[in-house]
Amino acid sequence: MPPTRVAIIGAALDLGAGRRGVDMGPSAIRYAGLSDRLEAAGLEVEDRGNVQAPLAETRAVGQERARFLDEILETCGRVATEVERARGDGLVPLLLGGDHSIAMGSLSGLAASGRGGVLWLDAHGDLNTPETTPSGNVHGMPLAAALGLCESFSRDGLRLPALDPARVALVGVRSLDPGEQALVRDLGIAVYTISDLDRRGVEPVLTEALDRVKGGSFVHVSVDLDVVDPEVAPGVGDPVRGGLSYREAHLALELVAEAGVMNGLDIVEVNPIHDHENRTAGVAVELAVSAFGGTIL
């Protein structure tokens, strides 16, 4: 059964992204009616506000191959604390980003009970390290860090590695850098590209991916809105053409709800600066509702 009690936790962080604006994502998603829609679906909702996150204008970039790393990891430590607290109170944490680097905090908080698995819905792999990154943007590294592949990311308050590589599934991928491709081959991580979804269909792929991520101490679902085609969700941090359709995205999250295994959910990379009339935040709300058991029809 899908969870019935939800803790909303915002992380208004954009230090890991190349384009500014995703720090406004949590406000945009709330404004689009997140709490009301979840409550209408029968869930008990507690909005716990935002964790403290610094502004780029007030901090130095730091190392070029992992820009603003210290500030990002400090914020992720606060996210981890709030996630662990929510789980201790019997609520499922729903994290609102912010850029995808906040997933290091989500996963660290869940890993208080041991390493788990993640269903990573994203156009990108987020498997770069400071050694392989083409940009230096940390939002391209959180999954690698959660697998323990970024040694310089070790900090008190973060449990890295948080994941078992055998329980990681990336779905909807349309762009992998060379270093990410090598890492996928070396670790045997399950990657389901957009071509796999086209050829096999959403339901068989998601069923297989969900079977893969189960069996650890938790199952986390991390949704970057750029997994959806930019014609449907234009306001994202790093859009890539050819993504999931509106219905395909909903079906994917509906299958998550039906599986009844989700212990936490990220909704990240909503960028209102590049959006049209808050359309992408509206899609984010609808996908969150689907993940928690709501239906369109």
Image (cartoon, rainbow, N blue to C red):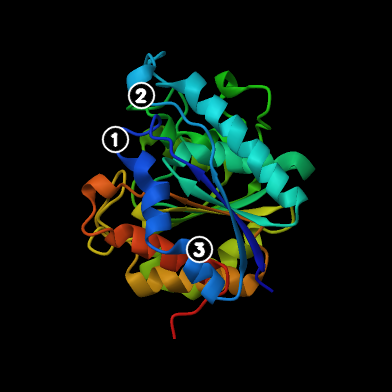
**Spot occupied by residue 133 in the image (x, y as percentages of width and height):** 39, 27
SS at badge 1: loop
* Quarter containing the C terminus: bottom left
| Residue type, label 1 | Arg
From the viewer's perspective, tell me whether residue 153 is left or right of residue 89.
Answer: left
* Residue tagged 2: 56
Q: Earlier in the sequence, mark 3 or mark 1?
A: 1
Disc 1 + disc 2, Cβ < 8 Å: yes
| Residue type, label 3 | Ser
Q: Nearer the viewer, mark 3 or mark 1?
A: 3
Residue at the image position 41 percent from the left and 13 percent from the top: 62
Q: Label 3 to label 1, Cα distance in Å?
A: 26 Å
**Which dot marks residue 43?**
none
From the viewer's perspective, tell me whether residue 91 is left or right of residue 177.
Answer: right
Is the residue marked by circle 1 packed among few (<14), some (14-19), or many (20+) residues within 10 Å?
Answer: some
* Quarter containing the N terminus: bottom right
Residue at the image position 32 percent from the left and 21 percent from the top: 57
* Residue tagged 1: 20
Q: Earlier in the sequence, mark 3 or mark 2?
A: 3
In the depicted structure, whether residue 264 falls above or below residue 67: below
In the depicted structure, whether residue 220 falls above or below residue 197: above
Say which of 139 and 271 sits in front.
Answer: 271
Disc 3 + disc 1, Cβ < 8 Å: no
Residue at the image position 65 percent from the left and 44 percent from the top: 83
Is the residue marked by circle 3 packed among few (<14), some (14-19), or many (20+) residues within 10 Å?
Answer: many
